Image: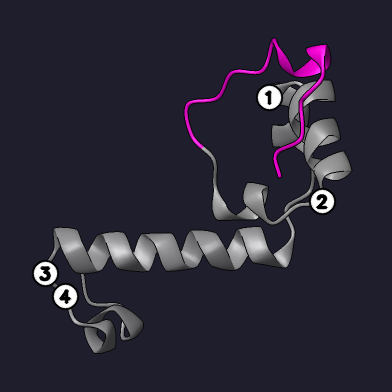
Amino acid sequence: MLKEIGKEWETFTADHLSPSQLNKNIDQWYYDYKVLTAAQRKALKPNMKMIFGGFAGQAFQDMIVYNLTLDEVMKGKK
């Protein structure tokens, strides 16, 4: 069963949704992405999920771009 969304969502625009966004409670997501501006969100202190997500993303990018193995990435080859 689908829920009808209210008019407060009519102004929402996004060019992507991340896994961390999709895993947030709806009230926290609304506050983070409808109440806060992008600059305010950027000023928030990062949490461990964000930090390690960045590490993982960089590792995968290095594996693809430089054709490295996981072992090579872990040893710092680039």
| Of marks 1 and 2, the one in the foreground | 2
What residue is rendered at 70% in x and 67% in y?
48
Query: Which label sits on residue 68?
Result: 4
Residue 77 image offset from top left, x and y in percent: 22, 77
Q: On the rendered image, what quadrant is the N terminus found in?
A: top right
In the rendered structure, which segment of residues is drawn in magenta?
1-16
SS under mark 4? loop
Label 4 – label 3 distance at C-alpha: 4 Å
6 vs 65, left or right, is: right
Distance of mark 4 from mark 2, alpha carbons? 37 Å
Q: Which mark is residue 38?
A: 1
Tell me, yes or no, whether the two marked residues, 1 and 4, touch with CB atoms within 8 Å.
no
Query: Is residue 25 left or right of 18 when viewed as pictured?
Result: right
Q: Sort mark 1 into few (<14), some (14-19) or many (20+) by Cα contacts within 10 Å.
A: few
Checking the image for residue 25, the label placed there is 2
Q: Position of residue 62 (x, y in %)?
A: 25, 63
Q: Nearer the viewer, residue 22 or 42?
A: 22
Q: Nearer the viewer, mark 4 or mark 2?
A: 2
- Label 1 vs 4, first from the N-terminus: 1
Q: Overall secondary structure of the magenta stretch?
A: loop
Crowd around label 3: few <14 · some 14–19 · many ≥20 (10 Å): few
Q: Earlier in the sequence, mark 3 or mark 1?
A: 1
Task: Kindly report the distance in space between the C-alpha atoms of the residues bearing marks 1 and 4.
Answer: 34 Å
Answer with the quarter of the image where residue 51 lies: bottom right
Q: Spot the residue most to the left.
A: 67
- Percent position (x, y) of residue 59? 35, 68
